[in-house]
Amino acid sequence: MQEHRATRLHWDFRLEAAGTMPSWAVTRGPTLVPLEKRLAMHVEDHPLDYQTFEGVIPEGNYGAGEVIVWDNGTWELVEGDDPVAEIAKGKLKFVLHGKKLKGLFTLVKIKPREGEHGEPWLLFKDRDEFSDPTWKIEDHAESVKSGKTLADLQRSRKDAPIWKSNRSAAPDGTAVKRAARRAVATDPIPRDAKPMLTTLVDAPFDDPRWLFELKWDGYRGIAVVEADRVTLTSRNGKDLLHQFPEMKALAGAFRSIPVVVDGELCVLDEQGRPDFQLLQSRDKPDVRGQKQRRKPSPVVYVVFDLLYADGRDVRERPLDDRKRLLEELIVPDRGVLYSKHVLEHGKELFHHAVQRGLEGIVGKQRASPYRSARSREWVKIKAKQRQEFVIGGWTEPRGSRKEFGSLLVGYYEGDVLHYAGHVGSGYDGELLSSLMKKLDPLARKTSPFADMPKPNTPAHFVRPELVCEVAFAEWTRENILRQPVFVGLRIDKDAKSVVRERPQHADPDA
């Protein structure tokens, strides 16, 4: 088995049979985790002398890139006597005696998905004494031939052995056709794609046509990841790399680039739950007005959708396909986390979210394309009453509090800003000072609200540009927030987009 970084990282699995080497490209690599399936695309047979090659395939040759001998050994059939005949039947059951891979395995041919090219198989480890539920391929990166990793080989590329192939000499023209397919022009990268937005509904539901994910509590951002450039843009078009510079290393988190992905920047607490206030703390100044000097909380980019990969714009493909491709592309432990999902059982996941104190869940139609708009094909069900509001002013403090007493907040209906109440809790001294520095430059003499606020201390007004997140108990009959608590500022949302969220009936067929 050779680890091979070509157009994308994969592992070439080859079995010697009848004087040649039938081969499969395993996109996520093999595993010793029992019954965990790996997609393995059946490719052309390779010559026997290629099995020990470790080095570089130059540009212009089929499979250009770096190759190491990731594992080798012997193998034997468990079912049948003729491996060529078993491959023709579409199933191989065999035992490997490798340095890394040992025990019983199965390869089985599957039906291609609609529009999928090639011959897909599944490779998986059967249960036996060599099974290992904790096994991870990233813990076994070195070559069994040289001890080098692919990264080592890239650094010493100029001194590495070379393999050149003349694929055009194939008598049946197959290589020529494959090379021609590889030369087909790629789709343009959707650099300015806008995010697909959810519709709030009133209750969780179960439906086999839907998948359900946890609702991640952070800053939404679409990343365009290329070899020499990364952009990370919020839903209101702001550059997020300025605040999260560690995301400039996203190119190392995907097995194939360029890619365009959609996700949420989060800080996770000790129990792995997203904590929006920890995310906010990264941008707090200290008491001297300088950026905090303590080490900032680590940020993880939780990705849940794929817009572009392997030279193809995949937004029109079903969500099921996009998520499968996305999971295969992610390199573990590189700052990117795949947003897992459950099929059909939204009520159970919602109950889990409530039990863990999470914000809620998101439901998505499995067949839905990616649309840069708000849609009923994606819905959110909140476990807590929480939404964004526009800051239109502040009140003078009372007692020992400094800076301000409450924030005056509202929401838009068209071009009209409606008052929703005053938010007086959720602050500490450091946060009060930080917010006041943002409010002072926005001062104005008149109220921006259509309906004049009636706070219990004198009010000061600001231009309605800042957006904050507020948790609350309920709306009163007068359309005022009851028991509101400040959660944090939203840098990823435009003030004019903030409306009052009114849940619609949860109808999966709508």
Image (cartoon, helix red, strand yellow):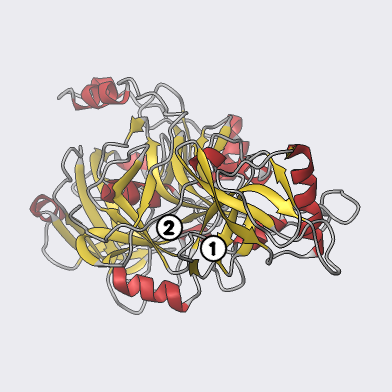
Amino acid under label 2? Answer: Ser
The residue located at (9%, 53%) in the rendering is 85
Q: Is residue 106 above or below residue 118?
A: below
For the question of whether residue 136 can be seen, the reply is yes
User: Which residue is more in the foreground, 493 or 246?
Assistant: 493
Give percent across and percent down for residue 392: 64, 46
Dot 2 falls on a residue whose secondary structure is: loop
Report which residue position mark 1 lands on. Answer: 481
Tag nearer the camera, 1 or 2: 1
Q: Is residue 232 above or below residue 486?
A: above
The residue located at (66%, 45%) in the rendering is 244
Quarter of the view holding residue 193:
top left
Sequence-earlier tag: 1 or 2: 2
Could you tell whether 37 is left or right of 300 in the image? left
The residue located at (29%, 59%) in the rendering is 211
For the question of whether residue 25 can be seen, the reply is no
User: Which residue is more in the foreground, 322 or 455?
Assistant: 455
Report which residue position mark 2 lands on. Answer: 339
